[in-house]
């Protein structure tokens, strides 16, 4: 009994050591790749950010070139619609209202 228990414990320890060696070997071989991947991912993130900022700036420049700097888009393009435009009509339709 005692010898089988010792054997079982030894095999368990050997198995644990084997898995630890495999784990350390994997960590040793893949850690530089993970660091390189993280650096690459950060570089890609920075590049995408720079591209999106350049696109946004281009749209702003296009907008500035289409309209003079002293006027706004709403002053040129937007007709008077909505509640303010309809209000005059409603007031005139009410008997005794403003004429």
Image (cartoon, grey):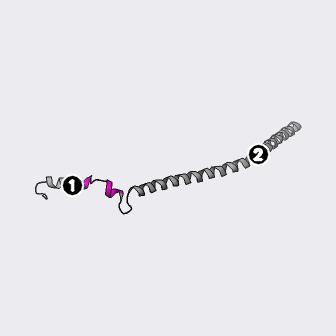
Residue 55 shown left or right of residue 4 in the figure: left
> Camera-side residue: 73 or 91?
73
Q: Is residue 84 magenta?
A: yes
Furthest-bottom residue in this view: 70
Q: Residues within 10 Å of mark 2 (few under 14, many from 20)?
A: few
Question: Helix or strand or loop: what does disc 1 sit on?
Answer: helix
- Residue extending farthest to the right is 3
Q: Position of residue 75 (x, y in %)?
A: 32, 58
Residue 65 lies, in percent from the top left, at: 42, 57
Q: Quadrant of residue 94?
A: bottom left
- Res. 62 image quadrant: bottom left
Quarter of the picture containing the C terminus is bottom left
Please tell me which residue lies in front, 19 or 13. Answer: 19
| Residue occupying image coordinates x 50% and y 52% | 55
- The residue drawn where x is 65% and y is 50% is 40
The answer to if 21 sits in the magenta stretch is: no
Circle on res. 50? none
Classify mark 2: helix, strand or loop.
helix
Q: Is residue 22 left or right of residue 48?
A: right
Q: Mark 1, residues whose alpha carbon is within 10 Å: few (<14), some, or many (≥20)?
A: few
Q: Which mark is residue 29?
A: 2
Residue 87's mark? 1
Quarter the N terminus occupies: top right
User: Magenta residues, as a range?
Assistant: 73-85
Residue nearest the viewer, comparing 92 with 96: 92
């Amino acid at each position: 009994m005692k010898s089988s228990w010792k054997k079982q414990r030894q095999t368990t320890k050997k198995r644990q050591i084997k898995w630890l060696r495999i784990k350390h070997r994997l960590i040793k071989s893949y850690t530089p790749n993970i660091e390189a991947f993280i650096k690459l991912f950060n570089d890609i993130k920075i590049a995408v950010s720079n591209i999106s900022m350049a696109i946004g700036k281009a749209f702003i420049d296009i907008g500035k070139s289409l309209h003079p700097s002293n006027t706004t888009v709403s002053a040129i393009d937007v007709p008077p619609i909505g509640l303010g435009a309809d209000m005059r009509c409603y007031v005139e339709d009410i008997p005794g209202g403003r004429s």
